[in-house]
Image: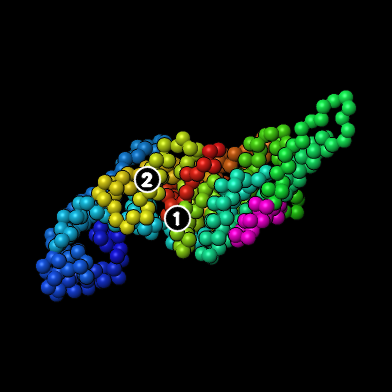
Amino acid sequence: MCTFCDLGICHDPGHRSQALLREWVRDTCELCTLGICLIHGASGPPVGETIIPLFDVKRSLRSTSTSVSLTEVSSTPRRGILSGMEDRTYWNPSQSDEALIISRLLKSPMGTQHAIPKNIHRFWTGGPMSPAVVDDLVSDGARAKQAGWTCYLWYSAEVERVLDGHLDGEIKKTEGIFIFSKRPPKPVDKRPTRTNQRRRLELAGFRVVPIEKLDDSSNWLSELATLVGGAAVQRNWDEVKYFSDLARLLYLNFVGGIHMDVDISLGDMDLTQTYFHNDPNGEVPLMGSLLRDQSDPMIPKLRFLKKIRRRPLLTKEEYDGYMEALSALVEKGMLAAGMLNALIASRPNTTHLKDTIVEFRKAILKNKGLISGMALSRVMLFGKSRQGDVEQAMKWTVPPYLVRLDPDTDESNL
């Protein structure tokens, strides 16, 4: 049964014809007439429609304050032994149903034209990841492969060459004979752990690829990675983080797909779906980052949605809680397009991605160092002009899987 048919807001002609057939069958069934039939369902034909508000949320943007409300919908009362339960039980929306609710909340439809390739990208370079993250990635990789998706783990071979060279030098300092001085402690070599982790990921279906594969003939990326590796030796990890911001732009531009930070797992994202850009030109990336760290006020709302996810039916209290949580998360996901880039999805070779990479390289030369990728969020939204309808562009960044991923992990603190 379609959730939106039950709510009275389904516009699918095929669903309507099926509903009419079901109503005719119930009208010819004596048990249905008595209200005790358990075969044809509890919802009979319309018996006088009532209007109830499905959703109402007030939100504020940076520059304007607007009230967004979904259209009022028609609800038909139930008959027989389930009479009166319309005030107490609701179907738990599927991801597809949820996408329609999000669209109505935003007053902006989900896209259906410009498909995003079924690739999932992550970037990690330097030392090994935590065991919990690797376990989640292995699980994600196996599930994605079974559904026809390809998972990538990107790293910088040049950054790691510089770091490994420094580590080898530090290890060598601990060798030999020390007579007049104390032997320095030998640093821990975690490279075998890193190698084993990448092997596990490959066995789970990941492609483990150096980002330098995307370098051009000028070797600008490799030269930049050398500088980043030197900064990492000095414990300046911000340079590595900003290099990651650049890397995700590169592989989305060359390969396309969905970038996720390593501490975000697939959750119950529907991998049978093909996802699309929401803007008509297929240029604005999908984003939808929700959490910055474990102190984020959105965490209780995400945990509530996760708790009720597997239930086919919701009580009225749970359904109201679902709608309240979803509305807050949709607003956060929209506004975060200018602040967070833990999630970015795009088809390859878009003008906006190319413009963002060009501007990133210009900023590196101007600042004599890397910058945060989010400094170029307007370029991702509008291209090199950086001009346009900000509110609409931010609506286009909200993906249908917004609350289906699982960013709420022990590794989510930045």
Under tag 1, what secondary structure?
A: loop
Tell me which residue sits at (26%, 50%) in the image: 315
> Which mark sits nearer the N-terminus, 2 or 1?
1
Give the image quarter of residue 60. Answer: top left
The magenta segment is 196-215
Image side of residue 113 versus residue 50, left or right: right
Label 1: few (<14), some (14–19) or many (≥20) C-alpha neighbours in 10 Å: some
The quarter of the rendered structure image containing the C terminus is top right
Position above or below: 155 against 185:
below
207 part of magenta stretch: yes
The quarter of the rendered structure image containing the N terminus is bottom left
Image side of residue 302 versus residue 68, left or right: right
Q: Which mark is residue 304?
A: 2
Tell me which residue sits at (22%, 73%) in the image: 21
Give the amino acid type for the residue marked by disc 1 in the picture.
Asp
Give the amino acid type for the residue marked by disc 2 in the picture.
Phe
Rendered location of residue 79, percent (x, y): 15, 62
Position above or below: 275 against 338:
below
Work out whether residue 271 can be spotted.
yes
Image side of residue 188 versus residue 403, left or right: right
The residue identified by callout 1 is 268
Rendered location of residue 242, percent (x, y): 62, 40
Under tag 2, what secondary structure?
A: helix
Work out whether residue 224 can be spotted.
no
Tell me which residue sits at (45%, 59%) in the image: 270
Position above or below: 26 against 374:
below
Position above or below: 116 against 261:
below
Question: In whole angstroms, how far apart are the C-alphas of marks 2 and 1?
Answer: 14 Å
271 part of magenta stretch: no
